[in-house]
Image (cartoon, rainbow, N blue to C red):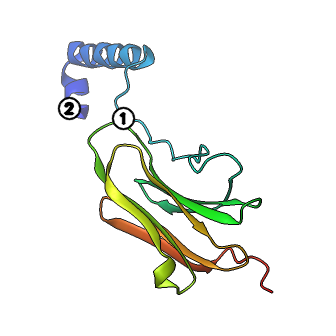
Amino acid sequence: MKRAVRTRVAGAALLAAATTVTTLVAGAGTSVAAPARAAAAYNRECGSGYTQVNQIPIPGRGTVFLAYNAATGKNCVVTKRNSSSGSPLWVGSWIQRNKELKSKQEQYGFFTSYSGPVHLNAKGTCVDWGGEIDGYAVARYKTNCGTLA
């Protein structure tokens, strides 16, 4: 680069012109870098009356959301991908009362957007819950405990 500037002024002018054209093209809306993926957001997939109370990110892939309905005492889990475009991926959601395998509710399959909702009556108890996207699984145990009698 320095050698070209020293020996040929015309080459340096051409390089400057090429840089200007590249800048103009980039300024016109053409993006060279890949756009950042937006994080998944809970959009009331569990239904009316449910409020998001917790979440676990799956870095670069999506988020697992835990929601609760105070009127019914039910919890709900949804695993959402960051993007709903592209090929279906293996996505799963599960929830159970803490250490009660018999209570486990789950949904797994190939989805383009999200897995779930899976609902569980768990008023006054702690829940274990989690999800998976394309082989990356996350979970939390003994969380979101209600008032125990």
**Amino acid at pointer 2:** Arg
In this rendering, the answer to whether 111 lies above or below 72 is above
Image quadrant holding the N terminus, namely top left
Q: Is residue 109 left or right of residue 94?
A: left
Give the residue at mark 2. 3
Q: Callout 1: helix, strand or loop? A: loop
Q: Residue at x 41, y 41 (%)?
A: 83
In this rendering, the answer to whether 35 lies above or below 71 is above
Give the residue at mark 1. 33
The part of the image, by quadrant, that contains residue 43 is: top right
Q: Position of residue 78 (x, y in %)?
A: 51, 56
Q: Position of residue 55 (x, y in %)?
A: 59, 61
**Amino acid at pointer 1:** Ala
Q: Residue at x 48, y 73 (%)?
A: 139
In this rendering, the answer to whether 106 lies above or below 116 is below
Q: Which is more toward the observer, 12 or 98?
A: 98
Q: Which is more toward the observer, 11 or 102?
A: 102
Can I make out residue 94 in this image?
yes
